[in-house]
């Protein structure tokens, strides 16, 4: 039967527990009551040889039916899955077992806040260290708030970028 509807293929995939993210089946059953809305589709899949049916175990209701996907049904359900999406760098980061931020995992030299107390008041500065020995990083000015420190750091970044574009 190659003329199974999308809904019927969805029932096969649901019975197998597969979807576009989980392509390997981990179960093979569909328990439906006698008045289930999908019974007509399930019975047509049984008729087509894509599923089998049997009475449900004794702990279920008397009119329940258990459907199992056949090998032909499994092939059809897996073949109907969309092609897997290309894994992004962020997906790779999520799958890796690291204890660093995404920026650090990418190898980006991230800025940091520095703190100091001067005359009993806390001051902040945003700075980024250089990766190269003998080169200065980019430093903002010491400010009273983190917001001011970030604005100062952004000004320092613009000045640093303009310097290197002029050279």
Image (tube, helix red, strand yellow):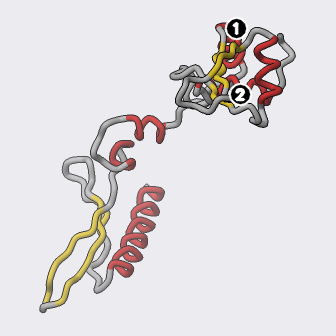
| Count of number-bearing discs | 2
Location of residue 14 (image quadrant): top right
Q: Is residue 30 left or right of residue 8?
A: left
Q: Secondary structure at mark 1?
A: helix
User: Is residue 140 placed above or below 37 in the rendered structure?
Assistant: below
Image position, residue 43 (x, y; %): 79, 20
Mark 2 and mark 1 in contact? Answer it, CB < 8 Å.
Answer: no
Q: Secondary structure at mark 2?
A: helix
Q: Is residue 43 left or right of residue 151?
A: right
Task: Please name the residue shown 69% across and 29% down the image.
Answer: 63
Image position, residue 113 (x, y; %): 27, 68
Query: Which residue carries the number 1 mark?
Result: 72
Query: Which residue carries the number 2 mark?
Result: 11
From the viewer's side, name the closer residue of 26 and 64: 64
From the viewer's side, name the closer residue of 114 and 157: 114
Q: Hey, which residue is sitting farthest bottom in the picture?
A: 119
User: Is residue 94 placed above or below 58 in the rendered structure?
Assistant: below
N-term mark: 2 or 1: 2
From the viewer's side, name the closer residue of 38 and 25: 38
Location of residue 106 (image quadrant): top left
Image position, residue 101 (x, y; %): 34, 50
- Classify the position of the C terminus by image quarter: bottom left
Task: Please name the residue shown 73% across and 12% down the image.
Answer: 50
User: Is residue 103 placed above or below 137 in the rendered structure?
Assistant: above
């Amino acid at each position: 039967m190659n003329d199974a509807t999308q809904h019927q293929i969805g029932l096969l995939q649901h019975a197998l527990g597969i979807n576009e993210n989980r392509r390997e089946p981990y179960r093979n059953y569909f328990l439906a009551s006698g008045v289930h809305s999908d019974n007509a589709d399930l019975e047509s899949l049984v008729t087509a040889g894509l599923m089998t049916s049997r009475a449900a175990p004794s702990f279920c209701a008397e009119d329940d039916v258990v459907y199992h996907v056949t090998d032909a049904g499994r092939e059809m359900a897996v073949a109907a899955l969309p092609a897997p999406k290309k894994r992004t760098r962020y997906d790779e980061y999520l799958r890796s077992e690291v204890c660093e931020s995404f920026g650090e995992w990418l190898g980006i030299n991230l800025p940091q806040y520095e703190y100091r107390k001067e005359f009993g008041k806390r001051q902040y500065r945003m700075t980024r260290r250089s990766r190269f020995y003998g080169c200065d990083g980019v430093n903002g000015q010491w400010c009273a708030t983190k917001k001011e420190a970030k604005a100062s750091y952004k000004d320092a970044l613009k000045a640093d970028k303009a310097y290197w574009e002029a050279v």
